[in-house]
Image (cartoon, rainbow, N blue to C red):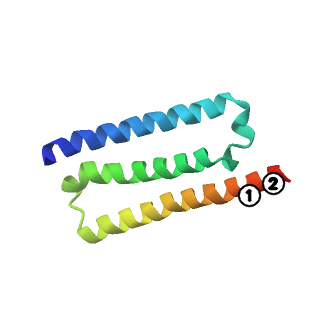
Amino acid sequence: MKSWLGPHMYAGVLLTLGAIFAYLYTILKSDEILTFYKTLPFWITVGILFFNLVTMPIFIFARQLKFSAIVYEFILLISNYVMYGCFITGFVINAREKERLKS
């Protein structure tokens, strides 16, 4: 079971990163570039992108760098806080924008 976990995890991260970069590329080409920070998909994208860019090198190079469990858990904890903080920020900003548009 463990032999299948690695390739699928890496493929999932690469596909997620590809989708994120495609989304960011479409934002750059559209008029949405002026208000992109007010949209929920942007904040979710930033959170997932940060989490994947921080944790994937740890998963790949953990044996070579000989991380201790405390360092590994600390990095995962901080990256989770940042990711979910981005999610919360996106939900709050999106809710305020919807309220503003209703008025």
Type of amino acid at the residue the image marks with label 1: Arg
Q: Describe residue 49's horizontal placement relative to residue 100 as left or right.
A: left
Q: Residue furthest right?
A: 103
Q: Position of residue 45 (x, y in %)?
A: 53, 46
Residue 77 in the image: x percent, y percent?
39, 66
Of 41 and 29, nearer the camera is 41
Q: Is residue 23 above or below residue 49?
A: above
Image quadrant in which you'd find residue 65: bottom left
Question: What is the C-alpha distance between the residues marked 2 and 1?
Answer: 6 Å
Toward the viewer: 63 or 45?
A: 45
The amino acid beneath tag 2 is: Arg
Q: Is residue 7 above or below residue 77?
A: above
The residue that appears at 28% across and 71% down in the rendered structure is 70
Query: Which residue is situated farthest in the front direction here?
Result: 102
- Circle 2 packing at 10 Å, graded few (<14), some (14-19), many (20+), is few
The residue that mark 1 highlights is 96
Residue 6, given in percent of the width and then of the height, sits at 22, 44
Query: Which residue is at 30% across, 64% downward?
Result: 72
Label 2's element? helix
Question: Would you say 48 lies left or right of 100 here?
Answer: left
Which residue shows up at 40% across the image and 53% down it? 54
For the residue carrying disc 1, how many other residues have a C-alpha within 10 Å: few (<14), some (14-19), or many (20+)? few
**Disc 1 on helix, strand or loop?**
helix
| Contact? badges 2 and 1 (CB < 8 Å) | yes
Q: Is residue 36 left or right of residue 71?
A: right
| Residue underneath mark 2 | 100
Q: Which residue does the image show at 47% across and 47% down from the upper left?
A: 49
